[in-house]
Amino acid sequence: MITRSEVHETNKMIEDSNLDVRTITMGINLMDCADADIDKFNEKVYQKITTCAKDLVKVGDELAKQFGVPVVHKRISVTPIAIAAAGCQTDSYVSVAHTLDRAAKAVGVNFIGGFSALVQKGCTKADEILINSIPQALKETEVVCSSVNIGTSRNGLNMDAVKKMGEVIKETAELTKEQDCLGCAKLVVFCNAVEDNPFMAGAFHGVGEKDCVINVGVSGPGVVKKALEEVHDADFETLCETVKRTAFKITRVGQLIAQEASKRLNVPFGIIDLSLAPTPLIGDSIAEIFQEMGLEEAGAPGTTAALAILNDNVKKGGVMASSYVGGLSGAFIPVSEDHGMIVAAEKGALTLEKLEAMTCVCSVGLDMIAVPGDTSPATLSGIIADEAAIGMINNKTTAVRLIPVIGKKVGQTVEFGGLLGYAPIMPVNTYSCERFINRGGRIPAPIHSFKN
């Protein structure tokens, strides 16, 4: 039972603190579209997506109007194309990316994810075709997002794939340099990717999911910051309790929207992802939460501890509000999408090395990091390997979304627009790791993976 005071409190969070439902994401299984003829496969994919998601945007808009809660994005995730299209007799999946783009635009969603491959233990022929298709696909489409999972705690790290993804990122940057290398902003490299993530660019519909499902991602960094202002100099126990209670309230809003969306679309409800996903707006920033906790800037000593507090208590509060919390759930730290992170990076308070340390306790990893355009593919692969190792050893999801901006150097900025924001070009350690990356093969799983 929702009380009058809870309704009033929620309205205040929306009006004053940028509370929103960041995304309603419909996951769609494409396995039944399999066909040896890629043209027939594309036709089946288009028909299934446009049939399943025909009312997604309309329902999202209706819910936002009825409940007064902004529903910022309506999105689609599909079965990883390297799996769904494995039976096609072809040497390129670029046409599939075009089909996904066309279907997404037909139903009016913001993004569609799932141009993906899962290669943690090795590559099939279809995986190789998918990965080789990524640069051209991201150049020629607008709303398609791509991801590749190169490792897990159970299987170790596929270092051949790590090397390849450094090259793919660099090629994608070159092909989309006229748009400030925007293609790379739609490409994520994962370790321990989850099957029910509603957030882009890494969303895909896992093979263990139902045929069609609704996942909802809520977001409220501004709400948490506002709540912490009320306990400005309180001790850590009070701080933690405040974050936990606030996360509970945020998740309840998402639960309401998710259940209503599921009912109206006649699609099963999957999970609530209660990640605190920032935007470039002032007052909607993870870095500003750190400042309210007592840090001068994000990146100051104590930042990793502050992020650990935030991430843990967001999860604790969220799981009390919904029985189906999933996805990534916690706190995101994308540099270009967070006003406070941008400022900290521009000042030099926040470095790539400090961000890497923070990813040990955050929900994702090195996200939306702009680096010099002359960064070598081997260096990009080395950064991916470092981040994947953190995920593998700590049994958590980590991801890398690096953007080598062709023609730009440290000290310059790149503008992506919208929720992608803008970013300063961050310095990268220029000592070579090429011989390390060129070893190839697979890094074995850590000893704690053997839990059976």
Image: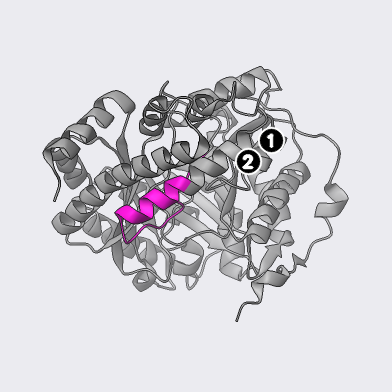
Q: Secondary structure at mark 1?
A: helix
In magenta segment, residue 404: no
Q: Secondary structure at mark 2?
A: helix
Residue designated by label 2:
358
User: Label 1 neighbourhood size at 10 Å, few (<14), some (14-19), many (20+)?
Assistant: some
* In-front residue for pair 432/42: 432
User: Label 2 neighbourhood size at 10 Å, few (<14), some (14-19), many (20+)?
Assistant: many
Residue at (61%, 71%) from the top-left corner? 124
Query: Residue 451 appears at what percent x and percent y?
Result: 62, 77
Residue at (74%, 69%) from the top-left corner? 444
Amino acid carrying label 1: it is Lys
In magenta segment, residue 328: yes
Query: Residue 315 appears at what percent x and percent y?
Result: 44, 51
Query: Residue 347 appears at what percent x and percent y?
Result: 65, 17
Residue farthest along the bottom direction in this orientation: 452
For the residues labelled 1 and 2, the Cα–Cα distance comes to 6 Å
Range of the magenta residues? 313-332
- In the visual, does 41 lie left or right of 121? left
Residue designated by label 1:
354
Which quarter of the picture shows residue 326? bottom left
